[in-house]
Image: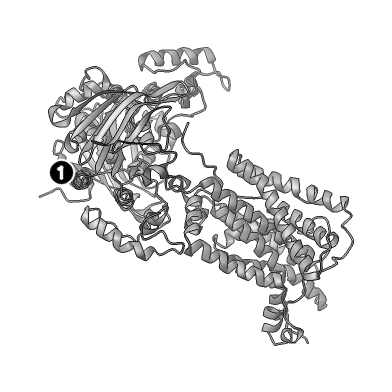
Amino acid sequence: MNHSLLVVLIASGVAYGTPLLFASLGELLAERSGVLNLGVEGMMLVGAVMGFWSVQRVHVGSAALSLILGLIVAAFSGATMAAIHAFLVITLRANQIVSGLALTIFAGAVGLSSYIGSDLNLADNPSSHTFQPFFPNAMQKWPVVGPIVFGQTALVYLSWLCVIAIAYYLTRTRPGLNVRAVGEAPGAADAMGISVVKYRYVHTLVGGAFAGVAGATFTLALTPQWVNGITGGAGWIAIALVIFAFWRPELCLVGAYFFGALQALAPELQARNISLGPTELWTNALPYGATVVVLVLVSWRGAARRLGAPSALGTAYAREEA
Amino acid sequence: MATIELRGITKRFPGVVANDSVDFAATAGEVHALLGENGAGKSTLSHIMSGLYRPDEGEIYLDGEPVSFHSPRDAIDAGVCMVHQHFRLVDRFTVAENLILGDRRGAGRSFQLRPGAVVDQVRKLGERYRLPVDPRARVWQLSVGERQRVEILKALYEEARVLILDEPTAVLTPDESSTLFETLREIVAEGRTVIFISHKMNEVKAVSDHVTIMRAGRVVETVKTADADAKQLAALMVGRTLETVQRTRTGTVEGDVVLSVDGLSAESHRATTSLKDVDLSVHAGEIVAIAGVAGNGQLELAESIAGLRRRTAGTVRIGGRAVDGVRAAHDAGLGYVPEDRLGTGVAPNLSLAMNIELKSYREDQLGPFLRMGRMRERAEAAIERYEIKAPGPHAEADTLSGGNIQKVVLAREFAGKLKALIAASPTRGLDVSAVETVHKHLLDAADRGVGVLLISEDLDEILALADRVLVMYEGRLTEAPRDDVAAIGVLMAGGDATP
């Protein structure tokens, strides 16, 4: 079965975009509550290594159970990392940018995740269980929708559920209204009896859990093994994606698949023996280049606000009581 | 029985006793004014009533029952709501969404959001209390007056029995203020209680039944408003008799034009406040006031004259010299007392001495080196002359009170060879004694032949000081009759004053 390049690109865009989607959904939740977490890359790596460790070393009945446990462990590890950030910036009111960067350095490719990986000898072994396409083989052979819609792993469908759930939560429920208020005007929220601290902690931690799952998507599905720094900067792309998506979950999905397709472009072309010569370098660098451009564009004064950034993003909240 | 009663409330902050065994009671069906200077403790007291602060000593009673508020939410649940000076609204939400936020009893309390459910209710409340707002409008689209209405609606929606308003008229035009007073009368007519915090005598006289005067953290007296006159109240509030600062006019001013503005236009981030082709001239020794509700282009006017904002058209002359840019304006003899005292007026983390020297250091310092001794002497002289209350020349600017910061700014701006001065809301937020000092210095400056452009929202201030009055509305200036408050009010609201 030979699919056209476009179909394959979209299909692998969805696959490669899934960790970006998970990570950006998590970051979106944290940012909507007013907490900027630049530690995504670090949280992803810890989630990646811990999820991988769980699947390799913790033996449960079946492959499915083992993978589910792996995801839970990854989510829990991501949330634990996020808890460090949450404590620093919410309780101690430290600078969010500094704390987030510190978290990525602490947990990242030359930090905790790397230490765990080498200390537990996780490198150079393929994962004992991996996420496989969810639907039967026959369905994957259907034209166009086969590879794109039915050829994906359970993680992809899980991420779709998450997009719908988060979009509904933010726009249609009272807790969603509350978290938006906390991110926009914490003073107003506090005056109405909404606990700014509680909402920020919960959303930062859940955001970390999403980052952990995003990391595990690499080690358990995309490139099922542990390699130091396996996420390769995906955490940073995810942060840019949130801005790119104007803080809206449904647009995170579009953006994630776009960046995913960019990442898939080079290997796909290579597989078809289409040589781009030096251009290949550019295709590889494209997602990062686009990230830089997006970040520069929205960093222009006032631009972020017009695009829909939560007004209190990046600022600590303290009730004015002395 | 009093609806809300405070007994022996004491609240201490590091180094200050903000409330010192305060007793206060307000009954159902009255507007009770809380009058006092800044720092007299009225805000602290209102924050204790509304649950933001907890008192160190003393009790709060509602209808005779002791209550204890751990958060603003507790107070709201008990029926005590506060409209803060800085509104507690979420700008990006609609009016209805703002009402739903934190709603625990009303139609908006369901897990699923149903803004539609409260829209009708908001409309009805709005009609009943003359608080018209579109429930579906987003708060950022509303004017300041409308936002205040939303705050009051929110309190009514929460079924407040006690409504506390902290300096509510500071952001309103005279017309809006009198509408607000009517609304407040209507609210108390139903047996609710309104506590009205202010430092403006005439408003207190206009709206309240009783007035409690606070000074230095204590209650001085509670009187029936009808039995007190404004002078008496002012004396109680300040603790001494105030001199009334009033311009003694010497007829038309004949001096040279020291500040002239021709066809000045400038951009703003909001379309309504862009300056549109403004002409204006100030003579030596004259005080020209620009009246208007904040946000109609006053900031843009001040900044583009001072050289802080790029002009799109027009010229500014100071002492006959065309200037563009901060340095040029300063060198030509322009002083600028900005509206944003702490952010633009001073460098908050620098010492008082350095702040005073900020503009003149070029003239007599040794190249890149500062003459610290001379700076200190100058600062000490300024502290004495301007009666700045500060620990010394080395005190950091942001440790001073608003009034003292303003005196530091005046000391600096008056130091050079001044020809013209822009004073933008120079007394906003200051207490009565500081206002008096600032006014005196402005009058002194005019007497010395400085042309003063006074930008203010405070009509009393304008009437007391100005030789001529211009009204700014949506970026345009209109000449107003000097003594006709009603006409100025109409112009401020965008109306046409010519009959």
Name the chain under label 1. Answer: B
Residue at 48%, 62% in the rendered image: A173
Where residue A21 sits, quadrant-wise, is bottom right
Where residue A231 sits, quadrant-wise, is bottom right
B224 up-or-down from A275: above or below: above
- The answer to whether residue B126 shows anywhere in this view is yes
Name the element at disc 1.
helix
Residue at 79%, 63% in the rendered image: A219
Q: Quadrant of the N terminus of chain A?
A: bottom right
Residue closest to the eye, A288 or B416: A288
B69 up-or-down from B250: above or below: below
Where residue B264 sits, quadrant-wise, is top left
Amino acid at pointer 1: Ala
Q: Is residue B394 left or right of residue B187?
A: right
Residue closest to the eye, A37 or B191: B191
Residue where numbered disc 1 is placed: B487
Q: Percent from the top left, x then y, of residue B465?
A: 22, 29
B21 up-or-down from B110: above or below: above
Q: Is residue B275 left or right of residue A222?
A: left
Q: Percent from the top left, x then y, of residue B55?
A: 41, 30
Residue at 40%, 32% in the rendered image: B341
B8 up-or-down from A185: above or below: above
